[in-house]
Amino acid sequence: MLNRVTLIGRLGKDPEVRRLETGAAVAKFTMATSESYKDKDGNKVDTTEWHNVVIWRTQAEIAEKYLKKGMLVYVEGKLTYREYTDKDNVKKYFTEIVANNFQMLERREGGGAGSFPSASDEPAFSNRSGSGSSVPEPAGVMGDVGEPPVTDDLPF
């Protein structure tokens, strides 16, 4: 069985990071993905989906340091569902992506030296055991880290 989510989108806000009693960091942020299509009358329709993303431990600390609202980010993880009962005894449901990999697809605005992790920081972006590599690049989406992402007319 497989539970895998891959998203490329923009951060809706800076990551909110908190630390648990154990010292583990957890970062949460929203991420928007968009697509365009033409309706039956030929009018362009833009749709945006919002996703809740959670990142743990070292990657949460990296997210806190480098991710900013509006940045284009690649996220890979699994889909999870949570529920809880609020103080008014109403059940609340959450759908989240628990990320195990992420990659910044662009530099921070006004970025120069020091605005992007160095190559020595890169392995921290991947949580794959035994692998020191970063997240693989989705074909046709990411250029070299120093270049802006390649765009095309595909609706996804």
Image (tube, grey):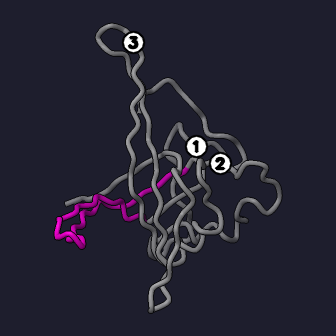
Q: How crowded is mark 2: few (under 14 residues within 10 Å), some or many (20 or more)?
A: some
* Mark nearer the N terminus (2 vs 1): 2
The chief SS type of the magenta part is: strand
Q: Is residue 34 above or below residue 124?
A: above
The mark lying in front, picked from 3 and 1, is: 3
Q: Position of residue 126 (x, y in %)?
A: 51, 67
Element at badge 2?
loop
User: Type of residue at label 1?
Assistant: Met
* Mark nearer the N terminus (3 vs 1): 3
Residue under label 1, please give it: 142
The mark lying in front, picked from 3 and 2, is: 3
Q: How many marks?
A: 3
Residue in the image at 24% along x and 70% along y: 86
Residue under label 3, please give it: 43
* Mark nearer the N terminus (3 vs 2): 3
Residue under label 2, please give it: 106
Distance from Cα at disc 3 to Cα at disc 2:
31 Å
Instruction: Check contact, mark 3 vs mark 2: CB within 8 A.
Output: no
Q: Is residue 153 above or below residue 81?
A: above
User: Type of residue at label 3?
Assistant: Asn
Q: In this view, does 71 lie above or below 81?
A: above
